[in-house]
Image (spheres, rainbow, N blue to C red):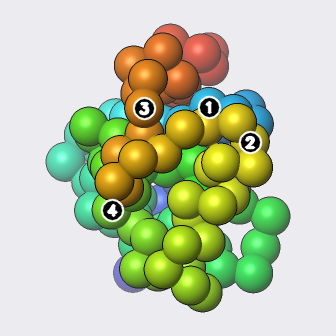
Amino acid sequence: MEEKPNFFKNAQDVARLIPKGRVTSYGAIAKYLGSVKSARMVGWAMNASKNTDVPAHRVVNRVGLLSGEKHFSTPTEMQLLLENEGINVQNQQIQNFKELFWDPNVELEP
């Protein structure tokens, strides 16, 4: 069971690199970590990062929906955190998602 904690730590480390005002997806982080089919595990890693310095609010689903909002302390916390960084969210959907998307597979060296 050693693998899961390391995967969680690695996913959280990648999330810490997402610049303020940008977002990425669970799947993009999973792909960067070499585990393409582990997007759900990235979500679990973000959920496990409560009360840490991990900006889990910057990680959304593949089309820019705030699918993790129910794991924050209030139903609107994720959206408020994003809006405080200048990201426009309407109906749980990040506006201009493609322009704001931060892809670790492009932005970070392998």
As measured in the structure, the alpha-carbon distance from the residue carrying label 2 to the one carrying label 1 is 8 Å
| Left or right position of 95 against 22 | left
Q: Nearer the viewer, mark 2 or mark 1?
A: 2
Q: Secondary structure at mark 2?
A: loop
Return the disc, 4 or 1, that comes first in the chain's sequence: 1
Q: Amino acid at mark 4?
A: Ser
Residue holding disc 4: 67
Query: Where residue 60 sits: x, y (%)?
Result: 41, 49
Q: Is residue 79 visible?
A: yes
Q: Give the label on residue 4, or none.
A: none
Most extreme residue toward the right is 53
Whether residue 23 is situated above or below residue 52 in the rendered picture: above
Q: Is residue 13 visible?
A: no
From the viewer's side, name the closer residue of 104 and 85.
85
| Left or right position of 28 against 49 | left
Return the disc, 4 or 3, that comes first in the chain's sequence: 4
Residue holding disc 1: 22
Q: Residues within 10 Å of mark 1 (few under 14, many from 20)?
A: some
Query: Where residue 104 sits: x, y (%)?
Result: 53, 26
Residue holding disc 2: 85
Residue holding disc 3: 95
User: What is the quadrant of residue 1 in the picture?
Assistant: bottom left
Q: Residues within 10 Å of mark 2 (few under 14, many from 20)?
A: some
